[in-house]
Amino acid sequence: MKKLTMLYEGKAKKIFDTDDKDYFWVEYKDDATAFNGIKKGTIQDKGIINNKMSAMLFTYLQQNDVDTHYVELINDREQIVKRLEMIPLEIVVRNIVAGSLAKRVGQEEGYELASPVLELYYKNDDLGDPLVNETHALAMGWANMDQIESMKKIALRVNELLTHIVGKARIYLVDYKLEFGLSEGKVMLGDEISPDTCRFWDIDTKEKLDKDRFRRDLGKVEEAYVEVYTRLKEVVEID
Ligand code: TMP
Ligand code: ASP
């Protein structure tokens, strides 16, 4: 496959066209932003870690019958994915209270939820990705009922699979964000799964091993990304 013109440059990735209309070429960058782009910086080699970690986790999910856009790794920073028609929603899955949920409900970070919480956010940078609910998504035409049900079902299955594997690496999967799209009408998991999009806490020390180190100026950002990837690589079995 050939890498052609750049179609889109996001905050953390560039998307290129390919000579096959069914596929995109994705390049992961070291650029980091937080608070809807207000805080900007660079996390050295983040693009490499996120590209490889996402490829590994998507492969693991696919081997467990989750449909995803992931196709193959090209090199350290690049991968091929299926072209999806993206649904303009972010699905956040939470197992432990942290971040915006801690603020919204006035509960301290670290409270273990009795069951997973699923939240929908409308993907719109100008609005800062506002929290919405299923009836907004339906009424605004962002997704239909079948698609919402599929996203919820896949998100809960992904949660079982990821919680299991992350736990084996002695890490808590606190919360994370998923994005979905359509390929030939079928709902598939897209985007990435990495320390940019998940909160990972060390089970033994409760140390944060994710982008919160950048968001909150905690230091040792690069080290945290490498640590999570190294630990997961040891426990994820890929055929
Ligand atoms: P939140 O607590 O700030 O709402 O974040 C919940 C999870 O979603 C957390 O793991 C980080 C991830 N996330 C993203 O991947 N992108 C975003 O733009 C935001 C706000 C959160
Ligand atoms: N990715 C989002 C942004 O740039 C927010 C975040 O991850 O905190 O601004």
Image (cartoon, grey):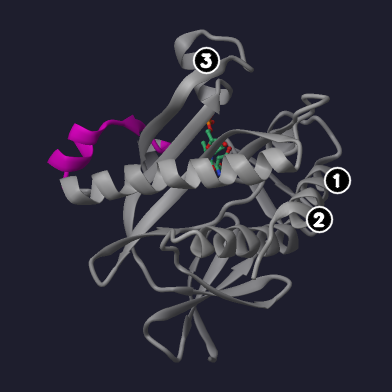
User: Is the C terminus in the top left, top right, bottom left or bottom right quadrant?
Assistant: bottom right
SS at mark 2 in the image: loop
- Rendering quarter of residue 58: bottom right
Horizontal side, residue 183 vs residue 225: left or right: left
Residue at the (76%, 46%) spot, across then down: 228
Indicate the amino acid at tag 1: Glu
Q: Is residue 134 magenta?
A: yes
- Nearer to us of marks 2 and 1 is 1
* Cα–Cα gap, marks 3 and 2: 30 Å
Callout 1: 10 Å neighbours few (<14), some, many (20+)? few
Question: In x, y percent, where is residue 78?
Answer: 64, 73
What residue does disc 2 label? 44
Callout 3: 10 Å neighbours few (<14), some, many (20+)? few
* First in sequence: mark 1 vs mark 3: 3
Q: Is residue 124 visible?
A: no
* Cα–Cα gap, marks 2 and 1: 10 Å
Question: In x, y percent, where is residue 34?
Answer: 61, 39
Question: In x, y percent, where is residue 163?
Answer: 59, 39
What residue does disc 1 label? 223
